[in-house]
Image (cartoon, rainbow, N blue to C red):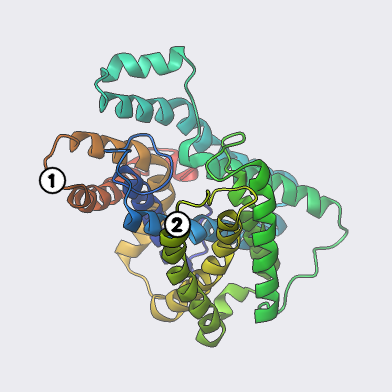
Amino acid sequence: MPSAPARNLYLDHLRVLLTVLVILHHAVIVYGGSGGWYWKQDPETPSRLLLLFNAVNQSYFMGFFFLLAGYFTPRSFDRKGAGPYLADRFFRLGLPLAAYFFILSPLTIALAHSGRGRQFWPDWGQRYLERDFEPGPLWFAEALLILALAYVAWRAGRKAPAADLTQLPSNRTLLLAALATGAASFLVRLAVPVGVNVAWLQLGYFPAYVVLFATGCLVARHQLLENVTFAQARPWAITTAVMFVLLPVMLVTRGGQGTFSGGWSVNAAFYAFWDPLMAWGIILTLLWFFRTRLAGGNRLTAALARQAFGAFIVHPPVLVGLSVLLRNSTLPQFQKLLLVGPAACIGAFALSGLLLLVPGFKKVL
């Protein structure tokens, strides 16, 4: 999750919003949403409303992170050169990935197991004996390292930078990109359905991630993300609204007629094409809205932007700890979500702020 230049305050604000959405996305899974997570209050009682929230969220929020990562890649590479650029990526992304893998992952798993009756401290030690490690949400850092290596290799094979875009893609180009992304997702999901990890990566979502990262790289030099207008976003916002209505219709009418996660089925094809058609409108609308309405900053927004990456890293143990603490409460599931979700956001950002006070952590976070 690369830092944005100070002049792009609205992009910093977007990063804060997306980080909050990541935390809320996982909180929703705890209380009935779709997806995998360390600990769930009641895995047998899914909620269609929360499933819809997670499906909409999943369609764009991580892809948006990849778009922003790509947007800052060419300028960083040009400024530093291939070697220093890769060294910086492995320092800024590799160290958090390793820290999560070997420290926060077993901690979070032990917290989750304590909610199922195991003793926390012995179980935490058992994670090391069993080598029970995984990157959790830091799969994002793993993916960015792979893309950084790919970008360096691509640049090394060219005598000059690519012919970058000088204007935003037309609606026709965006539509073709969405259809191509949907087709690629459908094909990938035939072999690797949504929910199946390969080296901790859900490859079923990666066609959109790669397209958005590449787009970020192509529009970076002319700073085209800062040129999105309402007129350009409007047709895609309408498309998003149509997709938003279609998903619950499909869930109600075809929910029992095959999986949406992958395979040769109408449901799987619908979901593969639904993802980018949903995402493009949300991304363009947010870029326009934040640039025109939320471009200013203050001390609070500056602090939150500075803490966003750290909050992204530490939120799993914070969220799991809070949800486990509240597990025996008689409150309804939705009320627990309304308490735990915001509390996890506040706790993760606060903990990130404390970590930034530790000498040396600012260089990584």
Left or right? Give the position of 156 relative to 187. right
- Residue type for callout 2: Ala
| Residue ID for mark 2 | 55
| Residue 74 in picture, x, y percent from top left | 69, 60
| Residue at screen point 41% across, 63% down | 248
Q: Is mark 2 on a helix, strand or loop?
A: helix
| Residue at screen point 37% across, 15% down | 125
Q: Nearer the viewer, residue 114 or 248?
A: 248
Circle count? 2
How crowded pointer 1 is (Cα within 10 Å; few <14, some 14-19, many 20+) is rated as: few
Q: For residue 331, which numbered disc appears in the image?
A: 1
Left or right? Give the position of 68 relative to 184. left
| Residue 65 in picture, x, y percent from top left | 53, 57
Residue 179 seen in the figure: yes
Residue 92 seen in the figure: no
Q: What element carries label 1?
A: loop
| Residue at screen point 27% across, 20% down | 120
Q: In which quarter of the image is residue 78?
A: bottom right
The first of marks 2 and 1 along the sequence is 2
- Residue type for callout 1: Leu
Left or right? Give the position of 254 relative to 50. right
How crowded pointer 2 is (Cα within 10 Å; few <14, some 14-19, many 20+) is rated as: many
Q: In which quarter of the image is residue 300?
A: bottom left
Asked if 357 appears above or below 24 in the picture, the reply is: above
| Residue 282 in picture, x, y percent from top left | 48, 70
Q: Which of 124 and 245 is in front in this view?
A: 245
Asked if 85 appears above or below 324 in the picture, the reply is: below
| Residue 175 in picture, x, y percent from top left | 66, 74
